[in-house]
Amino acid sequence: MSAFEFFLASSLEKVFADSRPKPLYDYTFNGLIGDRIAFQLVYSVHGNHGRSPLPEFDVTVSGIDVPVRLRDVISVPSHYPVTDKRDKNYLRTAPGLYPDLLVPSSGKIKPVSDQFGSVWIDVDLSSAKAGNYRLCVAVRSESNTSLSKELYADLEVIDCELPGQKLIHTEWFHTDCLADFYAVPVFSEAHWKIIGNFIHAAAHDCGINMLLTPIFTPPLDTAVGGERTTVQLVSVTKTKGVYSFNFTLLERWCRLCKKEGITYLEIAHFFTQWGAESTPKIMANVDGVETKLFGWHTAADSAAYKKFLTAFIPELIRVLHDEGFDKKHIIFHVSDEPHEQHLRSYLKAKKIIIPLLKGYTVMDALSSYDFYKKGVVSHPIPSNDHIQPFIDHKVKDLWVYYCVSQSVDVPNRFFSMPSSRNRIMGVLLYLYNIKGFLHWGFNFYNTQFSKKHINPFITTDCGFAFPSGDAFLVYPAPDGSAYASIRNEVQMEAFADLRALQKAESLAGRSKVCDIIHEGLDYPITFTKYPLESEYLTQLRYKINTCIRSYTE
């Protein structure tokens, strides 16, 4: 006889097909107005052994009059889930299927014999009224009503709004990857529609408020001598040695960003990655002929490029200002992550653009505090495994990033990691007053060095280059929109935690909030030492919400 099982699980639980996840034993939630409460319905059937067809079940959620969204959790392949540099805080290290992709649910589920599946349920409290609610997750079979089940969870909506996001957040937006995956001409109307869909997802679903802007094709993850599909928002003309620029596409980009709520622009790097030794690819009409004006063949400190930037940057700034982005809302870059061997070339490149960007923020990923101390980079973005010296020396307006290399002790969001390792970032961002968070992979759908394009539903590791979960946060849906991931939803929970902690501080003071965070711990939380259990995070948020309620009753 078949035995069906239905139960609720935390949003921090990853439901693998071959392993029974931990049930949610405390079915009590609380949240602020504007919060999004998420959990999972887990389902399975055992003992069928193919003897009879399995029924389909309808899933509904009732008990509160607010938008409730159901999405199916889909497992995707990971051939490269971990690097050889790792600690013990991983769920799995073997290649296999990992739960990550979220697709809109039809409201129907069909259990598979001896496998576990789940539905991601989130309750949007933006329009909720304060009060206590009893949520009912009903699972019903039309063919066999005896198999139906109702699961309950208690929800308290606190009479206080979750404050807006202060954190500046960018995930590098790869415009070329959208044209490549969907096989549409660059900046065609079809491409613009897809770009708009992904910017909408970035701003409204991913907490992104700063967007990487390809004034020229960004010189990122490109093999030396190779190139990515050209995505250049500024048309360049050179006639008899004189430059002129057409900003029509950039103006459209800026207006689209404004429409979707993007408040900061991150201008693509002016020099190549890994050393600032060359210039980005820049196409131009030179005396009537389409020409690759600059690229790997051009030294970063060439007189020709300096002359070009001297003509271009003032015009660029004028247009950005006209479109509503002032100097407080534009970030410029020299080159990504300079190391000791790059010092000379980086400083040469910096010397060219800094005089042209007086009063503007120029920042780069930088993991060497000594470089910062020497003034190589004025506004550093250290990785979370190199951030401590910057914290110890009280560097102001500190940002942080992580990527493929941050695989030991520190937070990250690989498929193979527990979701708690992703969500703890909210607490850390609060404790260390982090101003901005950068990640390189919103939608990178290429192999390493952009030598080939990939299908991210099949290849999640960029061809054995980066552990699955590093290179992209969203998936390209068939209709040109973006599918979310578990990693994004958990990261959004982290950002909501940060906002709740900031609200609690405004009411109870920072000391009180820090005491709540460290309650029961005998060590200070750092980027390399923090509670590993998911229960710590859910209980902390419950306590912070309760603290807020005590000041608003």
Image (cartoon, helix red, strand yellow):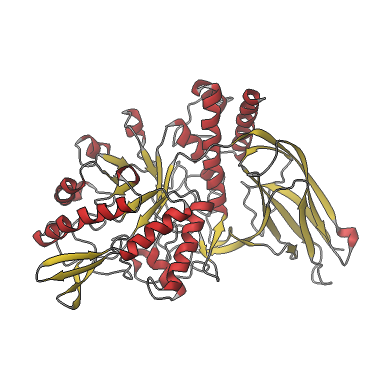
- Viewed as shown, does residue 339 lie left or right of 192? left
The part of the image, by quadrant, that contains residue 363 is top left
Residue that appears at 62% across and 31% down: 545
Residue sitting farthest toward the bottom: 289
Q: Is residue 469 above or below residue 432?
A: below
Q: Which image quadrant: the C terminus?
A: top right
Q: Which image quadrant: the N terminus?
A: bottom right
Residue sitting farthest toward the front: 322
Residue 89 visible in the current orientation? no
Residue that appears at 25% across and 56% down: 316
The part of the image, by quadrant, that contains residue 224 is bottom left
Residue 524 visible in the current orientation? yes
Q: Is residue 281 above or below residue 380?
A: below
The front one of 15 and 220 is 220
The image position of residue 89, as x and y in percent, is 52, 44
The image position of residue 142, as x and y in percent, is 86, 65
- Viewed as shown, does residue 451 lie left or right of 54? left
Q: Is residue 290 above or below residue 425?
A: below
- Viewed as shown, does residue 13 lie left or right of 4? left
The front one of 441 and 216 is 216
The image position of residue 410, as x and y in percent, is 45, 41
The number of numbered discs placed on residues in the rendered structure image is: 0
The image position of residue 102, as x and y in percent, is 60, 59
The front one of 363 and 88 is 363
